[in-house]
Amino acid sequence: MATPTPPNSPRSPQSARPPADPHVDGLVAASADAPNPYVRLEKWTWLLIFIGGFGLALGIATLNEDAVTGWAIVVPCVVAIVTGIVLIYVRSRLKDPKP
C-alpha cells in the first residue's frame, strides 16, 4: 500500500518552483518598481565587449604560433568589441521610458 505524499514534501507538486519573475531577463534583473526595457540590449553590449576582449587576447597569443589562425581569431573579436562600443552609444541616445 502506497503512502500519500505530505503536502509540503519535496516531491509534492505544491513545492514546485514559483513562476519566474517577469522582470528577470537572462543575466540582469530589473527592479520591480521600474522595469527596464533595455535589459537585453545592455546584456548583449557587455557580452560582446567582454567575450571579444577574451578572444582578442587569445588571438594575440596565437599570432606567435600561427599567424593565419591568430588573425582569424583577432578580426571577429575586434568586430565584436566595436559592435559593443556602438551599442553603448546607441543605448546612450535612447530615452528612458517614464513610468
Image (cartoon, rainbow, N blue to C red):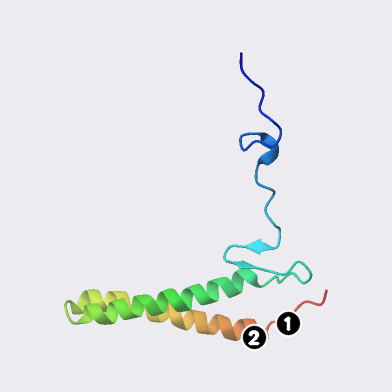
Mark 2: give few (<14), some (14-19) or many (20+) Cα within 10 Å: few
Q: Secondary structure at mark 2?
A: helix
| Image-quadrant location for residue 68 | bottom left
Left or right of residue 64, residue 22 in this image: right
Q: Which residue is mark 1?
A: 95
Residue extending farthest left: 65
How far, Cα to Cα, is label 1 from label 2? 8 Å
Q: How many marks?
A: 2
- Residue 21: percent from left, percent from top: 70, 57
- Residue 78: percent from left, percent from top: 39, 81
The amino acid on which the numbered mark 2 sits, given as a three-letter code, is Ser
Q: Which residue is mark 2?
A: 92
Residue at image position (32%, 80%) is 57
Relative to the observer, which residue lies in front, 21 or 69?
Answer: 21
Mark 1: give few (<14), some (14-19) or many (20+) Cα within 10 Å: few
Relative to the observer, which residue lies in front, 96 or 27?
Answer: 27
Labelled pair 1, 2 in contact (Cβ < 8 Å): no
Residue at image position (23%, 77%) is 62
Residue 4, label in figure = none
Left or right of residue 25, residue 98 in this image: right
Quadrant containing the N terminus in the rendered view: top right
Q: Secondary structure at mark 1?
A: loop
The amino acid on which the numbered mark 1 sits, given as a three-letter code, is Lys
Left or right of residue 41, residue 35 in this image: right
Residue at image position (56%, 80%) is 87
- Residue 93: percent from left, percent from top: 67, 86
Q: Is residue 50 above or below residue 17?
A: below
Residue at image position (49%, 73%) is 47
| Image-quadrant location for residue 92 | bottom right
- Residue 52: percent from left, percent from top: 41, 77
Residue extending farthest right: 99
